[in-house]
Image (spheres, helix red, strand yellow):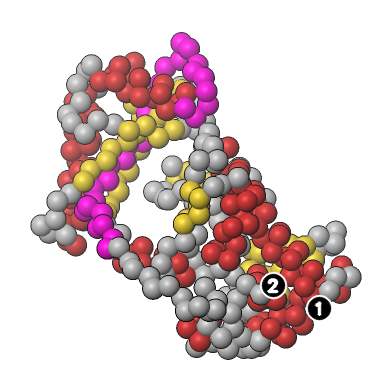
Amino acid sequence: RTFEVDRIYRFMKGSGLPVRIPCIEMVEIGAGGGSIAAVDTLNRVTVGPASAGAEPGPACYGRGGTAATVTDADMLLGRIDSSRFAGGNVALDADQSACALEQHIGQPLNLNPTLAAFAVSEIVDENMANSARVHAIEWGKELGSRTLIAFGGAAPLHAARLAEKLGLQRVVIPAGAGVGSALGFLRAPVAYEVVRSRYHRLSYFDADFANALLTEMHAEAAAIVREAAPTAALEETRSAFMRYRGQGHEINVNLPLRALTAADAATLQDAFNQAYTQLYGRLIPDLDVEILSWTLTLSTPRAQPEPVELSAPAQGAVP
């Protein structure tokens, strides 16, 4: 698979350096709570990708940060209860947020701090929404029936507006959303993916070759996973990255979890046709299909999370 790094233009495929490595399909937006807001040479409000990080952090942290950030905008818009932020362990200063927003956004655009905060919030929300739209279009997916899961420190503060922009009807904010990535890492199954680049055309499909390759890949993955999970049951997935002969990009097609036979040339052709039609809405007749790379993943079963009972907030408390 091709993963692009160091893109010159945000969201634009082909503007970065392609690296073929196993990776999770992600879109990096630069829209976190620490993302820095500024006004560019065209007097447009921009947010990210530069970030204030945790040190010094947003201006409201009072740790020496002077840049206006998304968290400062949220603070000034009343979305953050300063007395309960980080369990009350971090004292926030709304005056510092107002000062940073006025200096970096308000003065260049002749806006008061509150309008400057609203501008920053709208820009970062639109950046996220636009990224989701582009990503969905690239993969031939629709968004209307999807569920937005908001995790991360700032995501729950922006989830409703983002859902409104995308036309989503359901938003899930999980317990512990601020440390969602860490919780996911701790609960994730042990898994290992093996990738092999082996060119193969379906018109000359060799089942013995494919079976030998997949057996070798299975042994490599099992050796790694068994180091961390010696006795656990293992789940296996197989896929191939396929394309029409002469194309410059591939699509991921699932493979059967069994020994392949010569008759599976037709099985793989049908699976490719289905995946290609779902993505592009058409097929290209009279063109051979080729496999560029093979993947096999072994993983332990996913642990089912225990239900969490949340007590209702006291009457009058800010949820």
Q: Residues within 10 Å of mark 1 (few under 14, many from 20)?
A: some
Where does residue 186 sit, x and y in percent of width and height? 31, 67
Where does residue 171 sit, x and y in percent of width and height? 50, 54
Question: What residue do we see at 17% from left, 29% from top?
Answer: 259
Does the magenta-highlighted stretch encompass residue 312? no
Residue 19 can be seen, yes or no: no
Range of residues picked out in magenta: 278-306
Question: What residue do we see at 45% from left, 46% from top?
Answer: 20
Task: Give the amino acid at mark 1.
Answer: Gln
Is residue 211 rendered to the left or right of residue 272?
A: left
Question: What residue do we see at 30% from left, 48% from top?
Answer: 193
- The residue identified by callout 2 is 77
Label 2: state its secondary structure: loop
- The residue identified by callout 1 is 103
Q: Specify the farthest residue to the right.
A: 110
Does the magenta-highlighted stretch encompass residue 297? yes
Q: Which numbered mark, 1 or 2, is in the foreground of this view?
A: 2
Residue 146 can be seen, yes or no: yes
Where does residue 35 sit, x and y in percent of width and height? 63, 68
Question: What residue do we see at 46% from left, 57% from top?
Answer: 172
